[in-house]
Amino acid sequence: MSMTTTEATTHGAVGADDTSIAPELLLQMHAHMVTARVLEERLITMYRQGDGYFWIGGPGEEAFNVPLGMLVHKGEGIAYDYLHLHYRSSGTLVALGADPVDSLRQMKNTATDPYSGGRNFGSHYSVKRWNVVPVSSPIEVQYSMCTGTAIAQKRAGSKGITIVQGGDAGTAEGDFATCLVWSSRKGHESPVLIIVTNNRYGISTPWEGQHGEERVSDRGKAFGMPTVTIDGNDPETSYHAIKKAMDYVRTEKKPYLLEVMVSRLHGHSSASGANFVTNERDCLKDFEAKLEARGLRTRKEMDEMRAKVTQELLEASKRVREEPQPEGSTIYDHIFADKNYVAGER
Amino acid sequence: MSMTTTEATTHGAVGADDTSIAPELLLQMHAHMVTARVLEERLITMYRQGDGYFWIGGPGEEAFNVPLGMLVHKGEGIAYDYLHLHYRSSGTLVALGADPVDSLRQMKNTATDPYSGGRNFGSHYSVKRWNVVPVSSPIEVQYSMCTGTAIAQKRAGSKGITIVQGGDAGTAEGDFATCLVWSSRKGHESPVLIIVTNNRYGISTPWEGQHGEERVSDRGKAFGMPTVTIDGNDPETSYHAIKKAMDYVRTEKKPYLLEVMVSRLHGHSSASGANFVTNERDCLKDFEAKLEARGLRTRKEMDEMRAKVTQELLEASKRVREEPQPEGSTIYDHIFADKNYVAGER
Amino acid sequence: MATVVQAVRMALHVGEDRLGVTDIFGEDIGPPLGGAFTQTQGLRTAWNSPLDERGIIGTAIGLALAGQKPVCEIQFCDYIFNTIDLLKIAGNTLWSSNGQWNVPMVCITPVGSGIRGSIYHSHSFDATATHIPGWKVVMPSNPLDAYGLMLSAIVDPNPVMYLLPKALMRTRALPEELIPGEPGDDKALSKMIDAPLGDRTQWRAEWPDTPNLFVPIGKANVLRQGEHVTVISCGRLVREAMRASDELRAEGVSVEVIDLRSLYPYDWDAIKSSVRKTHRVLVVNEDTEITNFGEHLIRRIVEELFYELYAPPRLLAGAFVPGIGLADNLEHASVPQRSQMVTLLRELASHEP
Amino acid sequence: MATVVQAVRMALHVGEDRLGVTDIFGEDIGPPLGGAFTQTQGLRTAWNSPLDERGIIGTAIGLALAGQKPVCEIQFCDYIFNTIDLLKIAGNTLWSSNGQWNVPMVCITPVGSGIRGSIYHSHSFDATATHIPGWKVVMPSNPLDAYGLMLSAIVDPNPVMYLLPKALMRTRALPEELIPGEPGDDKALSKMIDAPLGDRTQWRAEWPDTPNLFVPIGKANVLRQGEHVTVISCGRLVREAMRASDELRAEGVSVEVIDLRSLYPYDWDAIKSSVRKTHRVLVVNEDTEITNFGEHLIRRIVEELFYELYAPPRLLAGAFVPGIGLADNLEHASVPQRSQMVTLLRELASHEP
Ligand SMILES: Cc1ncc(C[n+]2csc(CCOP(=O)(O)OP(=O)(O)O)c2C)c(N)n1
Ligand SMILES: Cc1ncc(C[n+]2csc(CCOP(=O)(O)OP(=O)(O)O)c2C)c(N)n1
Ligand SMILES: [Mg+2]
Ligand SMILES: [Mg+2]
């Protein structure tokens, strides 16, 4: 299998790479992609049925986000990778091993939602034990914060790296530049894998007319970091590109800018209707065609897989509907860690 | 005379340029440089003698700032150039024709200070009739505001362009990126001459260790704009480079990034002592040597010129000392334009 | 019967048509969407900016300095907090230049809770906005004020912050709030000025002929005269206050309801007269309750009208918590509820010194 | 007798030496300068950041999330206003994640007027800081508190905003404010911990052995007991309040002086007891007077202690103008002056209900 990139990096081409991915891995990837996709479909349905107030998520990005999650050096603390994600990262969470039912809980804002206890919108993940720092809604702020975890990792001589991800339109915020500047300081470079998932849209605003750069990845060049733009609709391309980028960041302890062209299969969010769009590539469909052609999985197997997950999540959504809502009085919980802490008083 | 640049632009080299500058122009340039330098020296002395609370200014940047002021298409309104400057721009103001005594007034925070009425620090210029928008202390905000004047100029089909200037360390602020992003939007490019005056220092923080980029100008490349880094210690190089950049911006109505290597001859400001530094190039000294060698002005003439301006400004500073201070009650003036304006009530 | 959002759109049309507005811009403001709330559909001068709030405010300042009349938008006030330094500059440029450069810009930003917006679509901005000198700050509570305040904001030579309560966007005018010139019929208006679904490239709005009707900045609206207690509010909570007053009327409690409309400058005369009459006052807003604009009003009331007061003035504001949670219980516990207004007003009204 | 700035430096040394501080960073914080006010000279973990306030706050949050203990600085609070969104995130991360991630960072920022700093070196930040939930906010008025509050800020598991009055930097300790372990002699201390002029590459600070002395966050300091009227202040204005109280003592007016030290959480018990005793209160701070933190205190005093009050509580705060002008006349007209305190306290003390 050979990897297609829309552009080769200036620092050592991410070109043809003949290391093929083991079939088991491909099948696992596929399974995660199916789960992630079905999860998003379930969340959209929940929204439509009044079991959630807002939907935003990542259908169309699974071919990148799933391999990303699979390749993360997962764990808690600076020995492991930190993930500064945004609201389209369910594929990554599924690949990390998150229970999709927890996403339904956040959608239904139940007290049992492990990410925010019913406080935040769906797809706003936070998993302390896997270093998934809280996803917050303001676009691009994660790019200003991620250098902090990276500096800590580098100082500790850790194998862990910092991964930050956001959209294309958001790169217009100064925080994206902050990330480039801070991570590339000569002599103080920090191990950040800087990912931009480019679906060529802000909410309704097309890429055209908003960008002077041909590619977002070009913006890394001035800072001397390796940059590449890849086709994120192909999970194998993604897997290799992520691996290569991660290896560089882990070994060199320096930043790497990876731009990923992806689809936005249900529009921006429920605010724009969340309907399936037919004019963009569907990475899952394409990948399934490949798997079938290679004889790795039959259409029937895949249909059954999908039906099974769909049924499971449908049932789960009914159970979640019955789970308790947070109490109003809990708004005062967790304003401060160690609520009554006063230095010198213990 | 041939122009030296530390780097050629990728878009049409700013290389050897044999158009020599007319002797009268060189002499005028020199005169402005002398005035600007002596003005800064006077301001520093005023600060030292307690006739001002803070000094910051541009000694060491005259070889660039003076030609800049001379080349501005000067006037009020969108038909003319807008200047979004910072606190090292006295050379530009002198070349525009500002009365140096007004700078003394601002230093002494008199009510007669035409820039701020004794409200703002010295070198915080504001000249409505020449489109010099108010210099404000926060680093780099001018880069976020300048696209506004440029959009207005482009829409009006004006010959006027927008000029923005700031320091090297400040390019780490997101506002610098904002300027690159907004001015280069494809199909909506705006006529901004983006200048970075690089003295290789923040206040005390050296360039080394803070920047991943070799040159600040490299940051413009991803945005498809012409970029160049020039030696700002040579007024002839500066003149040609500014002219070339302005011609491009005026004609193409697109941004151009000009990085200028300069000296900081009295350190950062009075906060760091404002003493003359001996280890940086002195552009005035170098230029005077050239003028002398070319037989355009004798050492004696130049010494006399300098003595004369020095004397004039010394005397002026004594007069300014006697000018009135603003009254306390005036703090409520100019909070709102047209103080009692209520729409629909007239 | 225009909705608030239609009223804003009509006002912006008048602005660009005959009051000199040159630019209406922000994220998703131009075609095809015309604003996250449809507020800028069909406007000639509307354009999409990059996703960069600092660039938006900065560019608006630059346009204003160049003699243009920009109306910019921050899509949700939740996302304005990286621009406070620039807002301060917009507010201090005239002063810093000793009167040389005014900055005639308008900044629209949707505020407040009530759309189940969770942590980042429920913020208020009145405490922060009123703390920035040099700005005028307005907040409409109904379509007519939305229209008239927008026209006033546009012609004002100073920066004006236009806080638009998100939860009111689809609120329709009551009969007395009709904008002169709009067709009385909802469908007719919608057909004229709401962009159609689907392809909009050929669509043009057909604007009703609405007048230059200015709701003056700095004038409150005493929506209801009352005798026993005054409630001062603005935006979304004004109708809640009216309903609270309706409930209490049944109990024989007469509540004076003041809709501030302008937070700065605010209508001190209206407040003063009312406190002198009722001697009891409740200030209500949604922003969090520590260092809150309502506390300013109370401080001034106490300072100047202490001996007029028959009861301690009260504030009903948002809980001092880091966000408004998504679950209904959380939102309700975080922002003022009508039931709380009723209780407080009742307590105040029966309070004797 | 340490100065405030030396006290901060010694506290930071204790922080990095034995309280787990990993990073002290900001613009010009590392060698060679060690801070615009020399506050970080000689510290092992001090480093220079890029000139980017958003990066500074963002990186501090990231470091805190990674279990580090960062102390970051914004060089002047005048330049913090482009980071309010990030400060809000630091304050809401624990809450938004329902208790998972705390953000144990300290942010130091010099505040206030008094150094003839003109428009951009005179800002206050207490109104804005106290309006951001999830932060603790402290402001010392003397070297000992500067030391003890810094240690408390460092060990606190939450974000703490440390407001450092610029005008006090060189203020020396009074005898009762001596930090245990510091040599009593100014010159001796300076020799140990102030970086020499000129080349500093070989210089190492020699730190006095000062103890873990925590000034608890949330506890005010009743600096002077009084009977007739209470003045509540913090930072630079505390000594002014003491002097005002000295002046009034001569007239037989007994003023209770409360130094808040912590703005959030603030010491309500101390305020309450005092108001119950003197029945008259003046709140003084430098921030501009509309939507001001002092107005919160007054609101709460009025709400809870209305019938204890013998006079309307007063606020003395900064004029609501866009900046503090450079000329002395302008600065004096813009920020609270001792003479105004004296007048107001005198008026209050003689006020009978
Ligand atoms: C700071 C900020 N501004 C505006 C918004 C509203 N908003 C939410 S998503 C979005 C578009 C983001 O586009 P992009 O960065 O390309 O990411 P995508 O959603 O396409 O993946 C906008 C404007 C926000 N969440 N945060
Ligand atoms: C936003 C902001 N942060 C910090 C400062 C304090 N400050 C004033 S000048 C300066 C250094 C500026 O360096 P550079 O941009 O290289 O300009 P230079 O002074 O060297 O010309 C700093 C940090 C400021 N004025 N504004
Ligand atoms: Mg996008
Ligand atoms: Mg510099």
Image (tube, coloured by chain):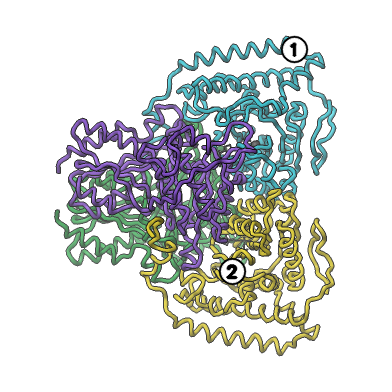
Chain colours: A cyan, B yellow, C purple, D green
Distance from Cα at disc 2 to Cα at disc 1? 71 Å
Please indicate whether residue D111 sits to the left or right of residue B151 in the image. left
Q: Provide residue A72's location: percent of width, then percent of height.
A: 67, 29
> How many callouts does the rendering have?
2
Whether residue D110 is visible here, answered yes or no, is no
Q: Chain of mark 2?
A: B
Disc 2 within 8 angstroms of ligand 2 (CB):
no
Q: Provide residue C12's location: percent of width, then percent of height.
A: 50, 47
Residue at point 67% right, 53% down? B183
* Element under disc 2: loop
Mark seen at residue A68 = none
Q: Which residue is mark 1?
A: A299
Image height check: is A135 above or below B159?
Answer: above
Q: Residues within 10 Å of mark 2 (few under 14, many from 20)?
A: some
Please indicate whether residue A189 sits to the left or right of residue C155 in the image. right
Question: Residue A80, located in which quarter of the rendered image?
Answer: top right
> Of A307 and A115, which appears nearest the observer?
A307
> Of A190 and A35, which appears nearest the observer?
A35
Q: Which residue is mark 2?
A: B76
